[in-house]
Structure formats: structure tokens, C-alpha cells
Amino acid sequence: MIAAAALVVASAWATYVVTRPPDDPGGTLPYTLVEVTEGQVGASVQMNTIAKWAPTPLGANRASGVITTVDVTSGAKVAQGEKLYSVDLRPVFVAEGAVPSFRDVGSGLTGDDVKQVQQMLADLGFYDGPVVGESGAGTAAAIRAWQRSNGVEATGIVESRSLIFVPSLPARVSLDSAVVHVGATLVGGEQVLSGISDSPTFTVPVTDAQATNMPVGTRVEISGPDNADWVGYVSAQTRDDASGVVTATLTGRDGNGICGTQCERVPVTGETALNSTIVTVEATQGLVVPSAALVSGADGTIAVVDETGLRLPVKMVTSARGMSVIDGVTAGTRVRVPGDVRP
């Protein structure tokens, strides 16, 4: 009987210990008074974002001789009839078409390559005849006008060496700098032109632990080349089980590109590491106290204790790095913090 009574008393005591609210700061413990002040709370970490293009072969050179000019930068968007480079002072242009440049095109020819030349001349405003792949006097006259506008001899014949056809334009392209540079010698047949997407991919390689702080939607502030400032958002995470590396993929707002009109600043070859700020907790302005000043009640409510010992109910807006933004008190209120915790 006595043993049973003792068991009941012990059980009741355990329940009380587990469920009673935590002691208020300063009840029996030493405390510091801290003033509630206006401020900002947020958290971020510094990491590298990796920018990388994905080039695909697009066109081969037909000219032979010494490169005298290079007229497009890697990563630039080119349009119909735009000049790419010059060989022996004769320009090489890009044009739209599925058939590679394989012969000189002038009057009296038929074929899809002729149609592609006519379409280029029409798009540039030099030809207003039918684009049917049959060339006559009108096509030859348009070719001569186009040649004069580019400062080359007006022969009425488009040499195969002067064009590189690509499937669609405008397109973002890259010239192989190892092959195409001023002073280099070309013999014809070199793969010189690659197509690249409108924007490089942006990824952040992280550990499993870091990935938990970077859920989808996390904002990433990227320091691009030449002082560019870009913003990306985590859109997906993939894990390589072999290496244990988690790759966070970034996109722009609403799934758009990140670098916009400044993508040409990212080197086309290899990977580019860019300094970045991962915003793990967005900065919030408001009334700030040390997180240690917050006490929880048995019902889950949160409060602070003022200098007189009065419990003041508050709402926690956000918390990071040991500080919290709260609502429910006024600036200047002095609250208790256990021990010697200070902002």
C-alpha cells in the first residue's frame, strides 16, 4: 500500500516536471537587461556559384588563308548576314540554312543553298524577288549590292568561303579561340563555330548539411564578371550518390535567365567560379532582441520578461544567428536575458 502511494506521488512529480513552463529569466537565475531596439535580422553564407556554357558544333570554315580580323566575341548573339571574321581581308558571314556552304552561288543555279542565299539577301533588304532556289539576274544584282555594302568586290557571285550556314538565327555563338584568332592560318574544313544556349547554367555544389539550408526558392546574390550583380533562386537539388555532392541548380526570377543581356561576360570555355551570397534567412526589419530572451509557455505562447518580472506576450517574426525580430512590445522596453547574453 505504501509502495503504491509512493509510485503515485513519483508519477505526479514527473508529470509536473515535464509539463510545467520553463522558469522565467531572472526568476532565480542571474540575468542581464537588454533594451528592445529597431534593427534587422537575417543570415547568409558565402559560397561559389559555378557558371558554365554548353556549346554544340554549329558550322565549319571554308576559307583558307590568314585570319586578319575577328569580329564577334564568344557568347555574342549573331543575326542573319553578320560578319564573323576575315581571312586575307575577305569577310566571312553567318547565314541561316540547313545546307552547308559547298559551292559558289551566282546566276543560273538552283538548289536549297541558292534559296538560303536568296533568303539572306531578302532579310537584309537587298532582294525582293521570289525565294524559290532559282537564281537569275535579280539574284546576281542583289548579291552585287550586298557585296558593295560590305566593301568587297561586286562580282555577283557569293563564294562558298564567305558564308557559314547555321540552322537558325539569331543565335548565341562561340568561335573556337584556339583556331580563330588574328594571325592564325586556316586551310578550310575547320570546325570553328559552336552554338550555345541563351544563358549559361548556374549551379552551387554543396554538402548534404548545406543543402538543408538551401531549399527551393532560396535567393542567391551572384557577383558576376566586370562588377555585374545577378540574382538567382534555387530551383532544384540533385545528389550524386558516388561523391555525396548535392548540386543546387539556380534560375532567375520566375524561371527566367540570370545574366540577361550580360551573359557575354561569362567565359565560354570551362567553368567560371563566381563569388556568391546564399541568403539562408531573408533580412527582416523590426524590433530585435536576443533569442535567449524569449520564453515559451506550456500552451506554446511566446513571451519576454520585462525588468519588473512581468511576462509580455510577443510574436516571433524571424530568427537568425541568436537574434529575433518580435512584435508585441515597444522599442526601448528592457527585457531579461539569462546569464550575460548581450546583442
Image (cartoon, rainbow, N blue to C red):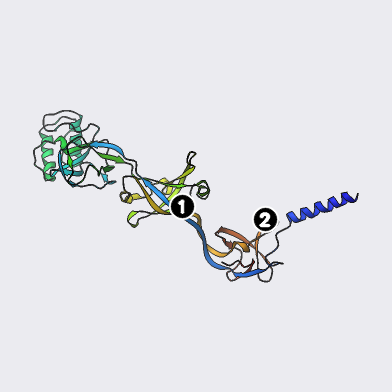
Q: Where is residue 168 in the image (x, y as percent from the top left)?
A: 27, 37
The residue lying at 13 percent from left, 38 percent from top is 143
Please state if 232 lies on the left or on the right of 57 as rendered: right
Does any portion of residue 128 appear in the rendered image? no
- Which of the 4 image quadrants contains residue 323? bottom right
Q: Which residue type carries mark 1?
A: Arg
Find the residue positioned furthest to the top: 110
Q: Quadrant of residue 295?
A: bottom right
First in sequence: mark 2 vs mark 1: 1
Residue 246 image position (x, y, % from top left): 48, 44
Q: Can residue 220 be seen in this view?
A: yes
Q: In this view, does 175 lie to the left or right of 6?
A: left
Q: In which quarter of the image is the C terminus?
A: bottom right
Badge 2: residue crowd in 10 Å (few <14, some 14–19, many ≥20): few
In the picture of the structure, the residue carrying the numbered disc 1 is 219
Whole-percent x and y of residue 257?
Answer: 38, 47
Q: Quadrant of residue 140?
A: top left
Question: Could you say whether the residue bearing mark 2 is in a helix, strand or loop?
Answer: loop
| Of residues 335 and 223, the one drawn nearer to the viewer in this rendering | 223
Residue 300 is marked as: 2
Instruction: Give SS at disc 1.
Output: strand
- List x then y, in percent, for residue 220: 44, 52
Mark 2 and mark 1 residues within 8 Å of each other at the beta carbon? no
Q: Is residue 104 left or right of residue 18?
A: left
Residue pictured at 73% horizontal, 54% vertical: 18
